Image: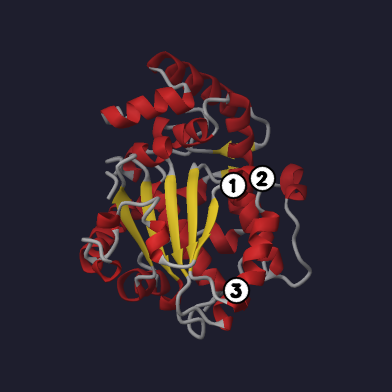
Amino acid sequence: MASGSGVTATALSVDKCPSRYEANDISPPELHRTIALQELGETDVRRVESLRLLREWIATHPHIRRCRTDALFLLRFLRARAYDVQAAQTTLVRYLTMRQLFRIWYENLDPSDRYMRELVENVRGCLPLGLDRSGRMVALVKVRCYDVARFNCYHLGRLQHMLFEAFFDDVELQIAGGVAIIDCDGATMGHFVCFKLSDIRNFMDCLVHALPVRVKEVHIVRLPRIGQALGNLVLSFAAEELRKRIFFHASMDEVLKYVDQDLLPVEYGGKSCPEEITDSLKRRLADKRDTLLLLDRMEIEVEPYAHLWRQSDEGDVEFGMEID
């Protein structure tokens, strides 16, 4: 599993113009330094200068009220946009707006919440498998594990975003990106109808424009016929660049052309133990809890940017909606 940032929430602040900035920039491993230079154009000089420009912009932004300004947080956006500072600024604004506009998805991402704890410890439907030979973070999603009679789309969406945030500060993920394997074997109609059309559209828009993650590949495996319409919808909402990175496979054997088999759990012929993965994930989430909750203290004036997302008339993204 990718290494943690080692930064605690007590060392972080959401003061957008602090008296001093946190020097928590972690030097990447050699492999990732090479990737950063080749794919992102990252050098020590460019990194320092880009951080300076982004911090100055945040400090004077008329709509940003509170925001993390530590290096690891801001490097999420700079690396996701290959050091295009203006593009990183745009992504950060959309990220802050998204968190407030869709509070039911992004606020109070608390690993001690009873549903989040059950999903992580007992359901084990999303397993971060670690880094592959190319330095990318690989995660496995087992759709069949989720009981849609007990967990609705908001539980699943919040789990996904909690896990995103728990790994976003890892320099390996920031630089080399992530690979997702979505195993749809055993999925039912209930799994494919639990997300509303507006949910899918907004999530894909957030993934492309607001979440600071480099999506390298998405492998959707054994998608049943009842799920093909949803698969087509996902593709229709995805940007062209992302569509090129989404692959459909009839079996896990086809995925092995892209992913190291040893990373997979033993049930897939790999060497990973789901129990060990879960224990490691539990420790990470416990260590990251304060940092996850600190995100809720960031604030931006939403009104100038609310038009960027469509909200349905069904109230599915209303503020403060109860999900239990």
Q: Real-space Cα distance between discs 2 and 3? A: 21 Å
Dots 1 and 3: beta carbons under 8 Å? Answer: no
Q: Which residue is mark 2?
A: 240
In the shown orientation, is residue 196 left or right of residue 190? right
Q: Residue 180 appears in which quarter of the rendering? A: bottom left
Q: Which residue is mark 3?
A: 227
Q: Name the disc covering residue 285, or none.
A: none
Tag 3, which secondary structure? helix
- In front of the other: 276 or 321: 276
Question: Can residue 136 be seen by looking at this rendering?
Answer: yes
Dots 2 and 1: beta carbons under 8 Å? Answer: yes
Where residue 287 sits in the image (x, y, percent)? 28, 53
Q: Real-space Cα distance between discs 2 and 1? A: 7 Å
Residue 217 vs 229, above or below: the answer is above
Which of marks 3 and 1 precedes in the sequence? 3
- Label 2 crowd bin: few (<14), some (14–19), many (20+), radius 10 Å: few
Q: Residue 23 appears in which quarter of the rendering? A: top left
Q: Amino acid at mark 2?
A: Glu
- In front of the other: 184 or 285: 184
Where residue 315 sits in the image (x, y, percent)? 72, 70
Q: Which residue is mark 1?
A: 244
In the shown orientation, is residue 286 left or right of residue 301? left
